[in-house]
Image: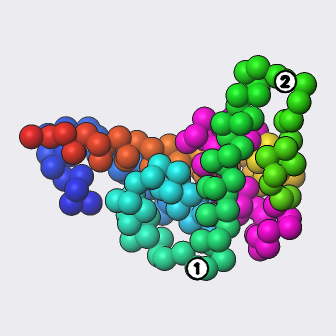
Amino acid sequence: MNKFEKLFEKIPELKEQYKLFENTISNENSLDKKYIKYVAFSSAIALKEKDLFSLVEEKLGKLEESEQKAIFLASSRMAVTNPYFMARNVHPLKAGGSLDSLNMSVIQNLGVKDMTAYHYACISISSINSGFVCFNSHLSNLKAHSQSDNSIDQAMRITASLNSLKQLLFNISILD
């Protein structure tokens, strides 16, 4: 937490954002621990912030190869689908509009071992990217996989807390 200490000395009220992150990954039990890991790493990757990635790794451990593959697939695929489907949502067209038109394979054909974890990664990334069409689709998949509203809410708060920590890191970078 040493990068944050300088900012917390100036504005101690900001500690609540760091505490939100810590509490949501450590002190709540709605969301399975393996999904917490997927959500936190996916958020750090979508935020493109190495310091956050290191913080998540420090708190939750390193990614296993299968976890990394699923998260990298999610982040790369959401980088295509989030802006594409959001743009189409703003102005519908009578052409395209499918994964096939983006030359994307169906996720079931890509060797992802835990589809629920993958969908958690996707809602985290889509939330950060403002890809709400994809967010809703992956949220529906989580509900179909019997994930509770409490679990999904915890995932969303992990994502929000990491987004706030990215802002704090930027704020630290502009301190005198």
* Residues shaded magenta: 107-136
* In the foreground, 56 or 94: 94
* In the foreground, 165 or 53: 53
Secondary structure beneath label 2 = loop
Residue 90 image point, x, y percent: 73, 21
Q: Amino acid at mark 1?
A: Glu
Q: Specify the label residue 64 is tagged with.
A: 1
**Residue 129 drawn above or below residue 146:** above
Residue at mark 2 = 93
In this view, which residue lies farthest toward the bottom? 65
Query: Residue at 65% of width from left, 71% of height from top?
Result: 69
Horizontal relation, residue 156 to residue 9: left or right: right
Horizontal relation, residue 66 to residue 111: left or right: left
Q: Earlier in the sequence, mark 2 or mark 1?
A: 1
Query: Residue at 56% of width from left, 57% of height from top?
Result: 42
Quadrant location of the N terminus in the rendered image: bottom left
* In the foreground, 52 or 96: 96
Horizontal relation, residue 15 to residue 80: left or right: left
Callout 2: 10 Å neighbours few (<14), some, many (20+)? few
Give the CA separation, mark 2 to mark 1: 41 Å
